[in-house]
Image (cartoon, rainbow, N blue to C red):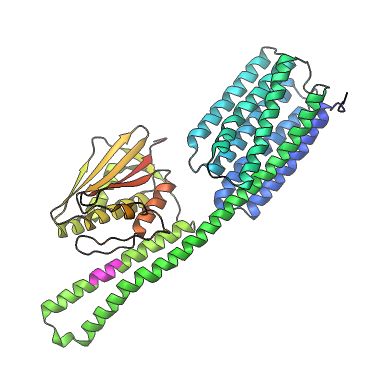
Amino acid sequence: MFQLLPVDPKTIFLLYFWGNFFTCILIFSYSFSYATIDNRKILKWFGVGKLVLTLAWILALLRNIISDFASINIANSMIFAACCYETIAMLSLIKANAKKEYRIQIAITTVAIIVFNIFTFLGATMNTRVVIGGAGVFAIYLLPTIIYFLEKEKSFFKTFYVLCYIGFEILILIRTVYRYLEPQNLIIANDNLDSLYSICLLLLTLIGIVGFLLLVKEKQDNKIQKLLVDRNQFFSIISHDLRGPIGSSVSLSEILLENMEQYNREEIKEISETLHDSNKNIYKLLENLLEWSQVQTGMITFSPKKVLLNTLIKENIELTKNAALNKNINIVLESTDLIEAEVDQNMIGTILRNLLGNAIKFTDKNGEIKIKLLKINQEAKISITDNGIGVPDYIKENLFRINRKVTQKGTENETGSGLGLLLCSEFIKLHNGEIWVESEPGEGSAFKFTLPLKNV
């Protein structure tokens, strides 16, 4: 019968130590040299996990030299924690907002650490500790593996990475069940299964690390590609939307300059007002273009702090009051509670002004705009509803997409680029919220967005 050479536990721990040690060097080198700011955070989680695992294997190697508490309890607790760090990094690659899943991972890890330490202090056998350790690691990796497996967006590297961890989970499950059914008072038994398990686990771990780095690079390349597409669209917006208002301003100023003597005071005033409106549109467009480009290039710093949303909304209503008064539009704020959230005040102010400006633009004279502020579970929900002309379906579907330029004239032929809504969408993403529109042509529009209220 085929028999693998028995594997000494210290040799295995030594291999795991050197494997993780060189992995740490590789990950942190890649992070500081090539990774983007977003990917650097993901790599940091993964790298910290491997660093903690490296330290855990050092403690395991020192068994019978240092105290059992350090070489068993602390070492295994660190292994569980390292797995938790790694799975958080895994989740970060596929979900922009996975805080719920992070909390689940931390809870599973905490339970695994507590259960392992309780059984150890109660004098559990070596085999029981191996079974609990295997079950704990299996439970920690289970959720991310399932999420990866069910992910709709497939790619070669993602599939490769998922297969590595499915194999990893299967190995751990087989060995844990086997040790439960066939108890042995050894960390690594002198049989084919444990020898094969140790070798395959080391290989899968190393291959999985390569898969992880390739997946990070793929995500980085996809983002760069998107930025290039957005940049081209950005220049398209500039060339198209600035040409009209700047051309109009030049023509009006030229008419005013060359024919000043031919116009009376009222005509000059009318031309000047038109010129002023054109310049305001140019300024608003340039302001939005600048802010949007700063978001895309990471130049805008996200600086959240505790803010009373009721007060922030009232302040921005005041800033748009003159535009509303010009069309005799009434703005009403409805809120039964004082709601505090941790937000970037400037960003939320920009969102409110853009949405209020749009509501005023698309509402007829003597209309009404209602702003509702509600607290639903752990979110603040803000809606800005008007009784204006509404948004057609073909425009509604593409409002928050830069690669689909859509514009609609206001009730008094006011123009816009649609860039303000793109900016709102980017700012909401930074807050881990959502923004959407509910509208029917001729029946008004309701722009709604949510903001998390965690830790407030």
* Residue at 21%, 44% in the rendered image: 333
**Magenta region, residue range:** 276-281
Image position, residue 352 (x, y; %):
30, 51
Image position, residue 257 (x, y; %):
23, 85
Quadrant of the image for the N terminus?
top right
> How many numbered discs sit on the rendered protein?
0
* Residue at 82%, 25% in the rendered image: 192
In this rendering, does residue 13 appear at all?
Answer: no
Quadrant in which residue 264 is drawn: bottom left
| Between 420 and 13, the one nearer to me in the picture | 420
Image position of 349 (left or right of 193): left
Q: Is the magenta stretch mostly helix, strand or loop?
A: helix
Image position of 121 (left or right of 268): right
| Between 62 and 136, the one nearer to me in the picture | 136
* Residue at 78%, 24% in the rendered image: 193
Quadrant of the image for the C terminus?
top left
Image position, residue 38 (x, y; %):
54, 49
Image position of 59 (left or right of 259): right
Extreme top residue here? Answer: 122
In this rendering, does residue 362 appear at all?
Answer: yes
* Residue at 43%, 64% in the rendered image: 234
Quadrant in which residue 408 is drawn: bottom left
- Is residue 33 part of the magenta span, yes or no? no
Image position, residue 406 (x, y; %):
34, 60
- Using the image, determine if residue 254 lies above or below residue 133: below
